Structure formats: structure tokens, C-alpha cells
Image (cartoon, rainbow, N blue to C red):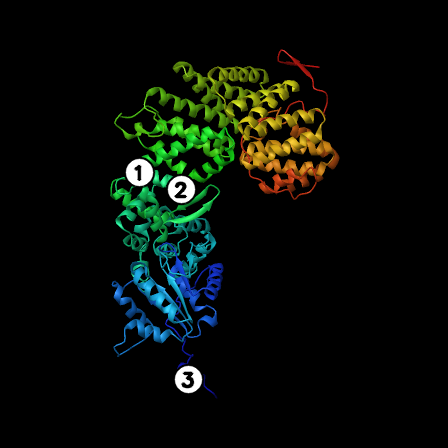
């Protein structure tokens, strides 16, 4: 009987050329990046993989090199690790040792390397060269010139800056891959561990750690003692928590702090200082903000660009293109390291105040520019700067003596909260702001010397609070939340009367009129809105808010049957908007004009106006303007005879309303188009079919719903997409079949 072969009887595997160690655990993710690097190796002889500490450059490069096209690695894959080499003249010796070369002649080591590599076809991975970049660059240049079959994958936190170098910036893992990596490493420690039941916590851990592979692996290692939920709670102190890498790991990979600290050691004093100061930003930032906030005391404003360029080269900061131009970003982990240094040098408070000042100035400029042809640019800019504006608001509302500035900032952003689909967030900040005492702190407190706002006396402190109050009332109205809206507006009105603030009083009256409109008190709404518009004229106030008051007045009189005045008011608004390049309020004026056209039986004109209104609302992410337009378009569609499509559009509107607030404000007037559309469609389709089509509309994504509504005139669903919605205007009451407009006398409807 033949015996089974023993291990020593088996033929030995042919030796693999090169010195890459075999992988001890599974490589996770990065399929697209691996394919891209392999393509680069075919066309470029030097590819430099760059990225922040802990992003997984070394493991990725080795894994990719081992699987490189065979044509470029006929003589193997060889790796040299330079992190432990401290002197430039030793780089050549380290490489020779990695290649297994011994030479007893008097030849220079560089010549030995050239002679060895000259006829070979191999891939050389040069890892950890950042601290020896000049010496390493010179050596790689000479070797590439002398050895045409050589391919080099350089791995570091900055480029080698050689001719022919192909940069390969490595980003953190995708969230799903990071979670898979966490689960893989966790299951090695806790057999049977799976993401089931822990997915939410694991995804949050990965997100908080920027999906950095090193950080994720270190976090998984903590499962010996902590659950994923407990880990999440402790990530604020990530550098103390994430230690304990494997004994076989490079020293700089054994803790998160040393991984990031390695980059810090390679920086000059000026680069470290800017790194620390840049940590004050939350999210992306632009060059102008960095120059203002971070300059002075060691970094001149003119030097910020050059120092920032070096931080970009070292992968401390990354560059990204955006709708508002070139912006920069630090990973949260890198930012947190800089923040520790900023605290350590005692400069965090001053930097946060400068940060606050810059974004206060930005918000002030954007509020003024909202009433201009640059409205779309303003919306994009605020969207891009939202993380930093949130940080500025948080600072103002938590730092003693800064509350009045927080009230000012929250109120100044009214156009974004109301006009760009951010009602819920706006209300959060506004409620926090008005709940706090806005009295100034000690006059010596730096908060009183804001360079951009100049709020230094009790009167201006009061104005900030008054503005926050009427904006809070406005936002609550749009959400259909009448009780808190009325409370805020009454407080604003009473305090404005006491302090003699004509501006705040006018806004309080205006928004109280708006509240009366959406709660069906049309006579009072008309009175208040006319009074507010008169006050605006007296004080010389003209902006999008003022024009919106005129649109709301038009809706109030339209609901009472006076379409002639409603049209006149909105045509005037449309003309003023055209004169100033204003588009957001114009969309609401178009909505009222469309309502009048529908009421008079001009369906083609009504649809054209509504489609323009919807396109503008979607562009600004204005959910309220969008959903009102879709509601009225559904009615126009039903009257045109396309009941199935009307049902679909109603379903789409139903899905949008919860993101705005109370559907149709709970108003019988605003609900009129909806009820009439549903009645017509149901009578034609029957309840069952209507319900099926409405549910199909509810399944449409936001962009799909808008594209479908915009394609209604041609019945083709290929209309290009635009953006989303935010503020009210007005559909109507007594939404009977299109008929001659009734007339109104003394505020009452007749005929």
C-alpha cells in the first residue's frame, strides 16, 4: 500500500524572484486602484504612490507590484524600505542589500547597482523615502537612465519630482471596503465576528477614522476589550485609543499617532505651524480663507501659499476641484493631530476667533449678494462652506461673550435656510441662538472686536437677536409650525417696538402676515403684508425678502378672488427681479402668475410658467418651491386630460412634503389644487388605479420626479435634471374649474 507523501517528499516550489514577503492576511478592496496602477506601470517607468500616513500606501504598492504585468517583472519584484535609514549616503547600500548584492571590489556602490540592473526587467518598490528625498531622487534617476527594463514604484508622502514621474495619489478606502477590512481583522481576533448587528457602528467608526486602513485595523484590534459601540464612544481620543499594531509592523505603523507623527517630523517649523492653524477649518477651505485666518506670528500672509504647497506635496493637505474653484482639505485624523499642536501652543482660541470673523464676513457678503445676478454662485459658495459655517456657529454659541455673533450669523443665513432647502438645520441654529442670553461679556473680551461685524454696543446686540427671531419665525412658518412661529414673531415685534427698530418691526409684521396667509386668515394677511411693504418703502429696504412679501400679498388677494391685482403685483416683482438678476423670488412670482393663468383657462401658458418656476426651485434645492410647483403642475396635467400622469406627479409631491414640513401648511387654500387634481384623476382612473400610480410617483427619486414634471409638455421623460427646493409662495383656494375671475370689494369676495 502506497503511503501518502510527507512534506519533505514533495517537490519544492520554484523560488519566486524578488524579496517581497508573502502576505499574512487578506488584502481588502482597491480593485480599481490596482488596475489603474498596473496600467500606469505599462506606460510609465516611475510611478509614485503618495498619500497621508495610514492610508495604506506600503501594503497597496507591494500587493500591486506582486501582481504587476509579467512583462515588466520578468526578473522579479524587489522592495527596499528606507524608513530606518538616516543618512543620505547609506541609501545606495540599503538598496544593494535589499537586492542581495555583495561586491568586494573598489567599485562605487552606485556603479554596482547600475551594472546589476542594466539588463534586468524588474519592478523596484522604494518605500519610505520622504526624509531622504533628494538622495533617493538622484539614485532613482540614475538607475532609470541606465536600466531601460527597470520599473520603480516609489512609496511616500511626497513626490520625487523627477521627469517622467507619474503621480498616483492614494485615497482612503471606500466606506464598504473599510467596513469589510474591519470585519476581516476583527474576525481574526474574535472568531465568528460579523458585521451583522454591528454594521451601523462599524460604518460610523470607519467614517470617523476617514476610512484610513491603518486606523481601521488598529480599531479592530481594540475589539479584544471593547464592543464596536464602545469604540465609537471613545474615538474623540483616537490617538490614545488606536495603538497596538502588530510586532512585525514598521514602527511608524504601530500606532496612529506615530503614523501621522512621521509626517509631522518631516515638516519644517513653519509647515508645522501652518498645519496646526489649518486644523481650525472644518471640511474644505480655500486659499483666501487660509491666508487671512492662518497668517501672522511666524507665517506671513505672502508665504501661506508656498507653505501650503509643501503641505500638499507631503500629503498633509489634499487639493480638490469644486463648483466654487480649487479647495483644500485635511483628513479628520490629520486635522486632529494639528489641533492637538494648536492647543499645545495656546493659540486655539485666537485661531477660532479669526475663523469666526472670516465666515461672519463671508455670510454678510453672501446675504447682500443674494439679491443680485450672483444668486446661484452664492448658493454654491454657502453649500461649499457649510461645514466651516457650522463650526463658526458652534463657536459663537458655546463661547462666553459670543452669543450675539451667533445670533447675527444664524439670522444672516436666512436666505440659505429658506432658499436652499435647509429649513430643519436653520431652525436648529436659530432656536439655539435665541435661547441664549445675548448680553455682551466683559468689554475686554476679544469677541467684541470682530473685524468683520463690529458689533460692539447694546443696540447692535439687540438687532442681532431681533433678526434671529424673525428668521426663526419665518422658518417655522415654512415648516407649518405655527405656534413657535407666532411666539418668535411676537417677541420680535414687541422688542422692536421697545427699542425703536423699524427694520425688525417691519420684518416681524411681514412674517406675521405670511403666517396669517398659510393659516387661511386672508383679510388679516392682506392687512399685515400691505403694512409691511409700506414700512419697507419708508426705510428704503429692498431685497428678496421684500419682494417675497409682495408675492405673498399677491397670493392673499388671489385667494380672495382678485386675480387682476395678483397678476399686477407679480409682474412688478418679475420686473424688479429681472432688473437685479434675482431668480429665487422670481420663481415664486411665476408660480402665482401660473396659478392665475390656470384659473383663466390658459393651460399652455400656465405650464410654461410652472416649468420655469420648477427649474429655478430645483436649481436652488428649494424643496418648498419645488413641491408647490409639482402640485400645481399635477393639476394642470389633470385638466389637460392626462389623469395617469397627474396621479404620478401627486405621488411625487407626497414624497417631497415630509422633507419640508406640514403638507400644504394644513391650509385649505393651499390644499385646493391638490384636492381638485385628486378628484379629477380619481373619477377618471378609479381608486385602485389612482392609488397604484400615486405610489409609483412616491417611488421616484427627487431628481427623477423633477425631470418627469419638466418633461410634461412634450410627454417625453428625457428632460435634463436641475437641483432641489425651499420656500413658499402660493397655490390657491376655491380651485374650481378655470373660469372668469371673480371680483373683490373691501377685502371680501363677491360674484
Would you call the spot at circle 2 few (<14 residues within 10 Å), some (14-19), or many (20 or more)? some
> Mark 3 or mark 2: which is in front?
2
Residue lying furthest top: 746
Q: Residue 85's quadrant in the figure?
A: bottom left
Upstream in sequence: badge 3 or badge 1: 3
Would you call the spot at circle 3 few (<14 residues within 10 Å), some (14-19), or many (20 or more)? few
Residue 654, horizontal then vertical, whole percent: 60, 36
* Vertical arrangement, residue 450 with respect to residue 123, above or below: above
Residue topped by disc 2: 286
Secondary structure at badge 3 equals helix
Separation of marks 3 and 1 at Cα, in angstroms: 71 Å
Towards the viewer: 400 or 664: 400
Residue located at (43% from left, 57% from top):
183
Residue 596, numbered label: none
Residue topped by disc 3: 9
Secondary structure at badge 1 equals helix
Q: Are marks 3 and 1 in contact (CB under 8 Å)?
A: no
Specify whether 480 is left or right of 104.
right
Q: Are marks 3 and 2 in contact (CB under 8 Å)?
A: no
Residue topped by disc 1: 351
Q: Residue 361's quadrant in the figure?
A: top left
Is residue 698 in view? no
* Vertical arrangement, residue 65 with respect to residue 225, above or below: below
Upstream in sequence: badge 2 or badge 1: 2
Amino acid at each position: 500500500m502506497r503511503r501518502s507523501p510527507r512534506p519533505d517528499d514533495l517537490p519544492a516550489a520554484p523560488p519566486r524572484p524578488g524579496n517581497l514577503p508573502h502576505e499574512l492576511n487578506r488584502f481588502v478592496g482597491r480593485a480599481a486602484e490596482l488596475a489603474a496602477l498596473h496600467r500606469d506601470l505599462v506606460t510609465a517607468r516611475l510611478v509614485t504612490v503618495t498619500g497621508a500616513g495610514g492610508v495604506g500606501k506600503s501594503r497597496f504598492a507591494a500587493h500591486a507590484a506582486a501582481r504587476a504585468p509579467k512583462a515588466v517583472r520578468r526578473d522579479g519584484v524587489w522592495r527596499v524600505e528606507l524608513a530606518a535609514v538616516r543618512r543620505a549616503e547609506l541609501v545606495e547600500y540599503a538598496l544593494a542589500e535589499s537586492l542581495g548584492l555583495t561586491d568586494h571590489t573598489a567599485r562605487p556602490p552606485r556603479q554596482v547597482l547600475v551594472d546589476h540592473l542594466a539588463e534586468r526587467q524588474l519592478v523596484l518598490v522604494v518605500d519610505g523615502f520622504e526624509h531622504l528625498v533628494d538622495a533617493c531622487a538622484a539614485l532613482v534617476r540614475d538607475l532609470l537612465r541606465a536600466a531601460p527594463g527597470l520599473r520603480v514604484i516609489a512609496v511616500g508622502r511626497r513626490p520625487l519630482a523627477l521627469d517622467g514621474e507619474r503621480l498616483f495619489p492614494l485615497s482612503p478606502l471606500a466606506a464598504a471596503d473599510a467596513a469589510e477590512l474591519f470585519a476581516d481583522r476583527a474576525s481574526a481576533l474574535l472568531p465568528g465576528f460579523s458585521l451583522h448587528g454591528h454594521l451601523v457602528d462599524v460604518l460610523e467608526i470607519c467614517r470617523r477614522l476617514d476610512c484610513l486602513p491603518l486606523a481601521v485595523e488598529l480599531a479592530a484590534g481594540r475589539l479584544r476589550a471593547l464592543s464596536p459601540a464602545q469604540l465609537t464612544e471613545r474615538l474623540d481620543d483616537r490617538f490614545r485609543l488606536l495603538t497596538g499594531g502588530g510586532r512585525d509592523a514598521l514602527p511608524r505603523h504601530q500606532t496612529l499617532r506615530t503614523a501621522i507623527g512621521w509626517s509631522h517630523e518631516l515638516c519644517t517649523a513653519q509647515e508645522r505651524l501652518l498645519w496646526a492653524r489649518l486644523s481650525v477649518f472644518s471640511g474644505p477651505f480655500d486659499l483666501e480663507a487660509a491666508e487671512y485666518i492662518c497668517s501672522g506670528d511666524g507665517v506671513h500672509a505672502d508665504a501661506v501659499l508656498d507653505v501650503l504647497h509643501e503641505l500638499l506635496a507631503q500629503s498633509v493637505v489634499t487639493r480638490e476641484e469644486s463648483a466654487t474653484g480649487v479647495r483644500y482639505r485635511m483628513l479628520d485624523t490629520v486635522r486632529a493631530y494639528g489641533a492637538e499642536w494648536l492647543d499645545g501652543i495656546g493659540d486655539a482660541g485666537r485661531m477660532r476667533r479669526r475663523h469666526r470673523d472670516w465666515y461672519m464676513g463671508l455670510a454678510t457678503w453672501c446675504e447682500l449678494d443674494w439679491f443680485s445676478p450672483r444668486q446661484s454662485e452664492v448658493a454654491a459658495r454657502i453649500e461649499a462652506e457649510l461645514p466651516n459655517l457650522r463650526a463658526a456657529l458652534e463657536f459663537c454659541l458655546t463661547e462666553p461673550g459670543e452669543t450675539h455673533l451667533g445670533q447675527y450669523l444664524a439670522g444672516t443665513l436666512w436666505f440659505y435656510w429658506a432658499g436652499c432647502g435647509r429649513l430643519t438645520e436653520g431652525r436648529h441654529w436659530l432656536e439655539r441662538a435665541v435661547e441664549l442670553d445675548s448680553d455682551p461679556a466683559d468689554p475686554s473680551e476679544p469677541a467684541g472686536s470682530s473685524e468683520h461685524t463690529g458689533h460692539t454696543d447694546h443696540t447692535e446686540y439687540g438687532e442681532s437677536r431681533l433678526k434671529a427671531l424673525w428668521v426663526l419665525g419665518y422658518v417655522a412658518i415654512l415648516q407649518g409650525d405655527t405656534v413657535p412661529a407666532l411666539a418668535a414673531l411676537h417677541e420680535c415685534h414687541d422688542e422692536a417696538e421697545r427699542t425703536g427698530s423699524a427694520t425688525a418691526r417691519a420684518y416681524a409684521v411681514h412674517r406675521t402676515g405670511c403666517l396669517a396667509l398659510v393659516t387661511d386668515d386672508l383679510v388679516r394677511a392682506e392687512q399685515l403684508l400691505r403694512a409691511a411693504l409700506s414700512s419697507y418703502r419708508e426705510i428704503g429696504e429692498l431685497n428678496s425678502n421684500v419682494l417675497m412679501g409682495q408675492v405673498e400679498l399677491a397670493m392673499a388677494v388671489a385667494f380672495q378672488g382678485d386675480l387682476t391685482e395678483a397678476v399686477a403685483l407679480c409682474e412688478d416683482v418679475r420686473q424688479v427681479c429681472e432688473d437685479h438678476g434675482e431668480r429665487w423670488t422670481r420663481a415664486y412670482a411665476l408660480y402665482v402668475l401660473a396659478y392665475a393663468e390656470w384659473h383663466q383657462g390658459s393651460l399652455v401658458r400656465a405650464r410654461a410658467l410652472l416649468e420655469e418656476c420648477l427649474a429655478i426651485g430645483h436649481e436652488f434645492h428649494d424643496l418648498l418651491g419645488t413641491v408647490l410647483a409639482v402640485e400645481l403642475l399635477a393639476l394642470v396635467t389633470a385638466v389637460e386630460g392626462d389623469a395617469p400622469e397627474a396621479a404620478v406627479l401627486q405621488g411625487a409631491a407626497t414624497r417631497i412634503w415630509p422633507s419640508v414640513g406640514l403638507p400644504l401648511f394644513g391650509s385649505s387654500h393651499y390644499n385646493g389644487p391638490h384636492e381638485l387634481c385628486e378628484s379629477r384623476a380619481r373619477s377618471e382612473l378609479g381608486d385602485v388605479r389612482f392609488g397604484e400610480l400615486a405610489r409609483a410617483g412616491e417611488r421616484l427619486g427627487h431628481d427623477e420626479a423633477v425631470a418627469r414634471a419638466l418633461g410634461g409638455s412634450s410627454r417625453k421623460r428625457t428632460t435634463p435634471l436641475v437641483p432641489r427646493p425651499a420656500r413658499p409662495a402660493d397655490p390657491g383656494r376655491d380651485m374650481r374649474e378655470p373660469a372668469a375671475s371673480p371680483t373683490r370689494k373691501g377685502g371680501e369676495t363677491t360674484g
